[in-house]
Image (tube, grey):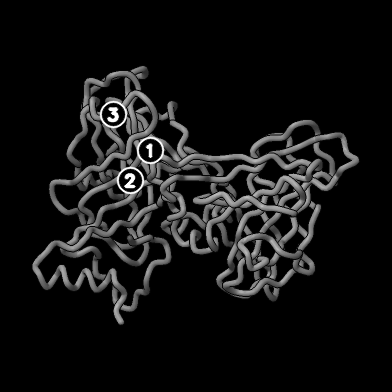
Amino acid sequence: MKPLFLSLIFIAAALGQQRPAQVVGTGGVSVTTVTNTFSITATGPQWAAFSWVPQENHTVAKVRIMINSVTGTLGAADMQLDIYADAGTGNPGSIVSGCTSTTVTATPTTAAFVEWSGFTCAITAFSQYWFVVKNPNTSGNGATFTMRYGASTSGAPLLLGSSSSQFGSFMVNTTLNGGSTWASLGSSVPFIRVEYLDSAVTSYAGNPLNNFGPVDATHQTFGTHEAATLFTTGVIGYKVRGVVLPCGKQGSPSGNLQIKMYQGSSGTLTLLGTTNNLPGGYFGTGGATSCTFYFPTVLTLNAATTFRIALSDTATDSTTIYYKGYPTFFDNDANSKALLPFGGTVQQQYCNATCLTASNWADVAGQFLPFALILDYAGEYVTPAAGAGPTAYFYVQ
């Protein structure tokens, strides 16, 4: 029996109807994407648990998770991470042998990724586990810390390249009483990176983000100033009809917002196309708006090629009246960056003059502007080179 979605495509084609558009991108384009926090305390005790489903059998060596804040001064015994098997109820059950650690690379004093080491536990492919964060030091000085995780009413941030497939039901659970009862928080995204050590071979998996959606008021879009996400396609190219991304305005720009697609990595870039534009009146005075743009003709994004999706203002405007993007922030560690979409190549950049010159673009460390490419329904992909395999860094809906 054919899957229902495919069957509907075939029926639509037979009736001469237009197929639904497919999209490829970074995920996180929802304007409802936010970050939440939960306090870890020795009293109660209050714990946070993050779900995890490995796709292969592995031995866990280290786990890296985002901490949002610290109150007081944490001691060596104030941070513990245990890996639990699932109880069969969607909650943590019992600790897996060898899966307890109170050893952190560095004790945090503020928001940071914290890495627990010293694990020697084997986990099984496609079984659900839980990373449970605790403060076991009941006789300590009362220091506490909070965990940070993503959340969205639409679930959009779950669509983050290949790394999204590492998270079972995308769950964050919390307890106020040391695991006697658990509360499940839906549509949540753990900010985690796991290091495996299998037969002396180190590998990584996870979702190494640390924030969603705060406005970027520093890298403003006006006049010759443009903000962009740089990315490099894999072994498959795309036929692109449009772009979706979160955007907004500051003040009342006299120009309209448009998207430019640049191609190239050095020298003089090629402007492949410019979309229709959205007037300032389209945007509210609050937070981000989900913006959809279309190119007048289909763009061909060839495989293994570097591109920039740039926000551009059609007028001069100013540093107080401008358009703005809403970045996704990530762990800037090299092993974490490699887990990001498009083979780890996504990177926000900023240009303030002659944006057709590649050297005028500078990296904005640790963030990218999330986007989704709307592919052409008449033919979504550029034929890959002979012998090329599929890319592992795209999401198709």
Q: Tell me the tag on residue 99.
A: none
Residue 246 lies left or right of residue 273; in this view the side is: right
* Residue holding disc 1: 361
Instruction: Decide which of tag 3 and tag 1 comes sooner along the chain.
Output: 3
Horizontal and vertical percent for residue 77?
85, 46
Q: Tell me the tag on residue 283.
A: 3
Crowd around label 2: few <14 · some 14–19 · many ≥20 (10 Å)? many
Residue pictured at 25% horizontal, 42% vertical = 292
Residue 395 lies left or right of residue 294; in this view the side is: right
Q: Is residue 313 above or below residue 198?
A: above
Residue pictured at 81% horizontal, 42% vertical = 42
Horizontal and vertical percent for residue 202?
65, 67
Confirm whether residue 14 shows in the render.
Answer: yes
- The three-letter code of the residue at mark 1 reads Trp
Of all residues shown, which one is farthest toward the right?
Answer: 139
Instruction: Decide which of tag 2 and tag 1 comes sooner along the chain.
Output: 2
Confirm whether residue 363 shows in the render.
Answer: no
- The three-letter code of the residue at mark 2 reads Arg
Of all residues shown, which one is farthest toward the left?
Answer: 16
| Quarter of the figure with the N terminus | bottom left
- Closest to the observer: 379 or 33? 33
Q: Secondary structure at mark 2?
A: strand
Q: Nearer the viewer, mark 3 or mark 1?
A: 3
The CA span between labels 2 and 1 is 10 Å
The CA span between labels 2 and 3 is 23 Å
Q: Are marks 2 and 1 in contact (CB under 8 Å)?
A: yes
* Residue holding disc 2: 308
Instruction: Decide which of tag 2 and tag 3 comes sooner along the chain.
Output: 3
Q: Secondary structure at mark 1?
A: strand
Horizontal and vertical percent for residue 328?
47, 42
Crowd around label 3: few <14 · some 14–19 · many ≥20 (10 Å)? some
- Closest to the observer: 313 or 38? 38
